Image (cartoon, rainbow, N blue to C red):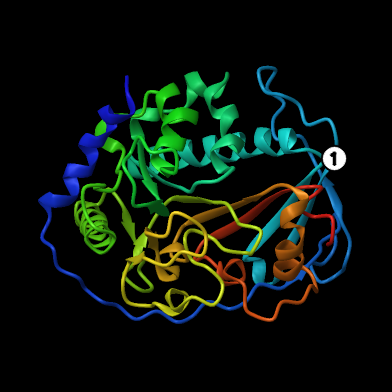
């Protein structure tokens, strides 16, 4: 199967009515970190070990203890692993468990992917036990952002996901929602938003009762060394967008310049967000977001504050300044 065989899903976007329904959304609060020891109040500063993600004999065992920390108001927790390998094992189990939960509850599992190193960290999903136990036919796959390039272009987030995940698991091609790469950035963003609205109307995607934005079951986010998430960059006006579901970027500070991206009201309406960060090059923005690190500007990652649950997956290098 070639990458282009999945492009059929993009045509779904053109079937729905092209109308926008702007909705208001309050800006999310910044994250603050408090650490929780075993069996004690969340306000005490400490670290407690957590167990291996699974005792299943088919699953790689976590050899070293991780650390779990809770943000105030129970809005999230941070898990720190000795290695990126350990992180990837835990991330696979986390994703598979949510897949099972929503497939049973809703009959569908809506998953939003990002680019960068995120797909590599999902590699355990294509191995036993998950390759044979996950109900892949229930998955509906989206992208939190995409570069406006052909699907077979090296910069394409779609191609990255296809080569690292989608070509290796039996997700239904019609359930993979890629952008229409024949359109301009502005038109592609409008088209993708129309697609999402169509799927909300048909109840494939859940809807937030709080604000009417789409409520994806799981959003898997990476983070750049500058603290950006999706294609929402520090200091960019799109950080304050609170009406559109999906917008476009023509002046990305990193190539390629033209992209589409979910806005923060959509990101923060998610039922679950996993922030997956590995490597020492990202230690500073992690320190700013979760510790007492300083930044002259509010980092986009600090604006991630979902309606549901937030879980950080960090390796020791990314958490080295906490």
Q: Is residue 41 rendered to the left or right of residue 163?
A: right
Pick the front one: 226 or 23: 226
**Number of residues whose C-alpha sits closer than 10 Å to that of mark 1, classed few (under 14), some (14–19) or many (20 or more):** some
35 to 298, vertically: above or below: above
* Residue toward you, 6 or 254: 254
- Residue appearing at x 32%, y 77% in the figure: 243
Q: Position of residue 225 (x, y in %)?
A: 66, 58
Q: Position of residue 5 (x, y in %)?
A: 26, 27
In the displayed structure, would residue 85 be above or below residue 109?
Answer: above
Which residue in the structure is indicated by mark 1? 65
| Residue 45 lies in quadrant | bottom right
The secondary element bearing badge 1 is classed as loop
- Residue 120 falls in image quadrant: top right
> Which residue occupies 50% across, 30% down?
164
Which residue is located at x 74 percent, y 47 percent? Answer: 279
> In the displayed structure, would residue 39 be above or below residue 152?
below
Quarter of the figure with the C terminus = bottom right
């Amino acid at each position: 199967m070639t990458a282009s065989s999945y492009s059929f899903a993009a045509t779904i976007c053109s079937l729905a009515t092209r109308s926008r329904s702007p909705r208001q959304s309050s800006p999310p609060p910044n994250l603050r970190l408090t650490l929780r020891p075993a069996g004690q109040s969340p306000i005490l500063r400490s670290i407690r070990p957590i167990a291996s993600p699974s005792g299943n004999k088919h699953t790689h065992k976590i050899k070293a203890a991780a650390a779990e920390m809770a943000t105030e108001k129970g809005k999230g927790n941070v898990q720190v692993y000795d290695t990126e390998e350990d992180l990837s094992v835990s991330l696979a189990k986390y994703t598979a468990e949510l897949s099972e939960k929503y497939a049973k509850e809703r009959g569908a599992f809506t998953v939003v992917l990002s680019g960068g190193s995120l797909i590599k960290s999902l590699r355990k999903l294509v191995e036993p036990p998950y390759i044979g136990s996950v109900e892949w036919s229930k998955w509906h796959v989206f992208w939190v952002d995409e570069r406006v390039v052909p699907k077979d272009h090296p910069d394409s987030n779609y191609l990255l996901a296809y080569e690292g995940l989608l070509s290796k698991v039996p997700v239904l091609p019609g359930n993979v929602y890629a952008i229409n790469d024949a359109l301009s950035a502005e038109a592609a963003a409008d088209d993708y938003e129309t697609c999402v609205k169509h799927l909300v109307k048909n109840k494939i995607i859940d809807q937030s009762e709080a604000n009417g934005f789409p409520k994806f079951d799981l959003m898997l986010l990476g983070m750049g060394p500058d603290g950006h998430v999706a294609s929402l960059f520090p200091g960019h006006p799109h950080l304050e967008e609170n009406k559109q579901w999906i917008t476009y970027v023509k002046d990305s500070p990193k190539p390629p310049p033209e992209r589409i991206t979910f806005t923060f009201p959509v990101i923060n309406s998610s039922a679950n967000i996993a922030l997956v960060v590995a490597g020492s090059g990202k230690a500073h923005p992690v320190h700013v977001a979760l510790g007492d690190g300083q930044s002259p500007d509010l980092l986009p990652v600090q604006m991630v504050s979902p309606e549901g649950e937030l879980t950080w997956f960090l390796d020791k290098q990314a958490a080295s300044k906490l």
